[in-house]
Amino acid sequence: MESRLPKPSGLKKPTPVRTILPTERIKAAALANLKNGVNNQRLPLVRDLTNLTATTGFGRGATGSPDLPKTSTFTNRARLRRSRSACDIRDIEKVTRPLKRTEPTLAPIPAKATKFTSGSTANIYTATTARNGLLSRTTKPSFESTTGSQSSTSSTSSSSSVGGVKRKVATGKPATNAAPTKSMVKRIPPYDYKARFNDLLEKHKVLKEKFDEAKEQLSTLDTLPEQYEECQNTLFSVQEALKNSKTEIDCLQRQNNSQNIKIDSLTKCLHDTQEELDRLKEKYELQCKEQESMITELTELRERCAYLTELSTEQSEELTTCREQLFRANMERKELHNVVMDLRGNIRVFCRVRPPLEDEADRLLCGWNYLDEATLEIHNLEMLASGAKNKGASHEFSFDHVFHPKSTQEDVFEMVSPLIQSAMDGYNVCIFAYGQTGSGKTYTMDGVPDNVGVIPRTVDLLFESVRNYKRLGWEYEIRATFLEIYNEVLYDLLSNEQKNMEIRMAKNKTDIYVSNITEETVSTANRLRQLMQIAKMNRATAATVGNDRSSRSHAVTRIELIGRHEQKNEISIGTINLVDLAGSESPKTSIRMNETKNINRSLSELTNVILALLQKQDHIPYRNSKLTHLLMPSLGGNSKTLMFINVSPFQDCFVESVKSLRFAASVNSCKLAKAKKNKFLNTSTNNSLTM
Ligand SMILES: Nc1ncnc2c1ncn2[C@@H]1O[C@H](COP(=O)(O)OP(=O)(O)OP(=O)(O)O)[C@@H](O)[C@H]1O
């Protein structure tokens, strides 16, 4: 900016090389006047005068050569002095007049220019220009003209050699306008000092006006500091805003980065999703194909289902017919089975001879002959050995079946199972074991854990039959009671409570029941076996001569089978009495006499009842003992009875064995009345109810 300020170089150049001429003195005087009035205009004016020689062409050397000032034609100065003095004045006028006519071009003001140079002038200039355009009319053209002056100094003389003011005019207007101006200049003779003085006064006046005008303009520059401060504030605010903007840009940049990261992750996610979508599409297409095939298959299956439904309907009708036929066949089978059982006899006797145990190997055995499956011979080997021809040494007995010592539990139950079938068909069945203590009654009825007897096998067969009957439309309900008769007192083997239990006649006058006894309905074979185990544990046992764990009571297991056929409106009620009698014992060997007496008495009463039945007596003494009273329905005719006669194989048991065998043989010959079904509700076949 400083470079734009007017330099006083125009004065320095001629000063050291030449002497001051009279014309120059005049110039100096004029300039001094100007200096007093327009101090700031002094330097450009002097400079213009200095260059006047070169531009006017009064110097011959000057016109001939542009280097005139340098070649210094000072030798001709005296000759030229007079002519030039007049020209100088005209030149001055020429210089001043345009200044008067044209817009005043202010010279730089050093004092105020300092302000321009001390600060950011460019900014101030720009700001001021932006605000009121004041400097655009005044200050800026001044700087430009000054700059142009400096540049024109080194340029050709034809373009502009007059000075700053003239060049300003030349710059502002076309060069063609300069010629008329030059012709209009009024020449003042050099000797007319008064005119010249007046002219100078005129110039002074003009310059003073210009000075005032410049001063006025300068006053407008007083607001520049305020404007500068305002600009500074604006600058600070702009810088602050710029800083905030930068911060905001950084923030936005960071947000942009994070958004870019998000975009990357979303792009990756999108890519994965796209892949997943492709996979799902493939899967979907595959499933569509599968679905199509399944639909086809489903259609086929529906057709097949319709065909099968039709077939099923036909078969259902056939099945109904078959069931009807089966039901009738089953009824016929029952009848035939009953006929067979009748033919075999309503009371059947099986004899079983037990084998000697390992610890009984030293005991002497009787002689046993098993003539056929129903006949055996027993020989008293001691008597035979003595040679006495006593009729009592050998005995032959016939029963429904004889089981020798090698017969198995399966063999025994095979012969028993038809009776269980009769119970399912609605008959009363009574199976009991009679014999000397230690002869094998409990073994036959209960068996041992690894070789179970009649009662556990009966349970298994019952539930198997229930399942089979279910297919024929029968629903069975099974109830069980466990009773013990000890010393002619009734005990509930499923309860340890002291109860008053009595044998009572049912309303139908043919059946009997025990009051206050625990009766449990069982639905599984396991549950029934559990109850049997409980009853066995509650049963009274004691050691006898013939058995370490002798059963000292009569145990009666009663199983009631209630079958219902809803379609046929039939009910079938059968009972199974499984009796493990107490072992008979000789009073001579008895340890507990009262117990033995009761046992023997009840067994004797049983014998009497059976013999009375055999002899078809009018009075059958059922009520003489609890045992016969309890077994009355089973012995009295409406029952299928099976009696096991268990005998020991030993010689020392010969008498008791023969006694039991005789009793059993007499029972076997006893003919009971035909057993009748308890309940048979079938209006098509039998309308009567029998108990
Ligand atoms: N057929 C058999 N095979 C093998 N062992 C048998 C047979 N019969 C009985 N026994 C065994 O003989 C012993 C006596 O049998 P069990 O207890 O059944 O006689 P019991 O007639 O019930 O006697 P009690 O009247 O005193 O109760 C038992 O150890 C039993 O295991």
Image: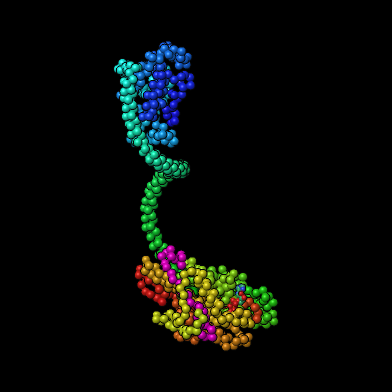
Residue 612 visible: no
**Percent coordinates x, y for residue 666 in the rendering:** 53, 80
Quarter of the picture containing the N terminus is top left
Q: Quadrant of residue 97?
A: top left
Q: Quadrant of ligand 1?
A: bottom right
The total of numbered circles placed on residues is 0
Q: How is the image coloured?
A: rainbow
Q: Quadrant of the C terminus?
A: bottom left
Highlighted range, magenta: 466-494
Closest to the observer, 91 or 677: 91
Looking at the image, which is closer to me, 218 or 265? 218
Considering depth in this image, is 492 or 663 the residue closer to the camera? Answer: 492
Q: Residue at x 36, y 55 (%)?
A: 313
In magenta segment, residue 297: no
Q: Position of residue 195 (x, y in %)?
A: 31, 20
Does residue 471 show up? yes
Indicate whether residue 486 is drawn in magenta.
Answer: yes
In this view, 373 is above or below 250 = below
| Residue shown at 58% from the left, 74% from the top | 443
Point 34% across, 36% down: residue: 220
User: Which residue: 38% across, 57% down?
Assistant: 316
Q: Position of residue 310 (x, y in %)?
A: 36, 53
